[in-house]
Amino acid sequence: MSNIKTEIAELVVKKVGIPKDKAGQAVDVVLNFLKQKLPPTVAGQMDAILAGNVDLSDGIGLDDAAGLLGGLLGGKK
């Protein structure tokens, strides 16, 4: 799992309270779903971000992304 996926999975564990392996699986499922639904150019940009080929030093809001993912999974309120 890439560093970004790992960070998202760790945030999901923290915010939702599910085991790390399940969080990683959930992140993979959601990201794969999004890549299938997004236009190819956007999906390619997402791949670049996940591969670590994009500078995210200005912040991507991973806490927000994990919170949204946790809400989709019915996690802690």
Image (cartoon, rainbow, N blue to C red):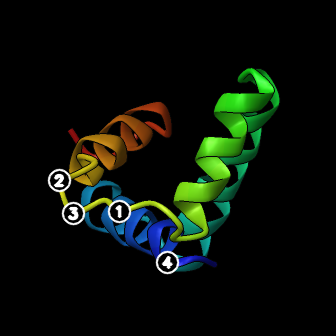
Image coordinates of residue 71 in percent, x first then y, are 37, 34
Q: Secondary structure at mark 1?
A: loop
Q: Secondary structure at mark 4?
A: helix
Q: Residue 71 vs residue 28: left or right?
A: left
Whether 31 is drawn above or below 55: the answer is above
Disc 2 from disc 3: Cα separation: 4 Å
> How crowded is the residue under tag 3: few (<14 C-alpha within 10 Å), some, or many (20+)?
few
| Residue that label 1 marks | 55
| Residue that label 4 marks | 20
| Residue that label 3 marks | 57
Disc 1 from disc 4: Cα separation: 26 Å
* Residue 66 in view in this figure: yes
Q: Is there a contact, CB below 8 Å, between mark 2 and mark 3? A: yes
Disc 2 from disc 1: Cα separation: 8 Å
Disc 2 from disc 4: Cα separation: 27 Å
**What residue do we see at 48% from left, 78% from top?**
3
Q: Residue 30 vs residue 56: left or right?
A: right
Q: Nearer the viewer, residue 50 or 11?
A: 50
Q: Is there a contact, CB below 8 Å, between mark 2 and mark 1? A: yes
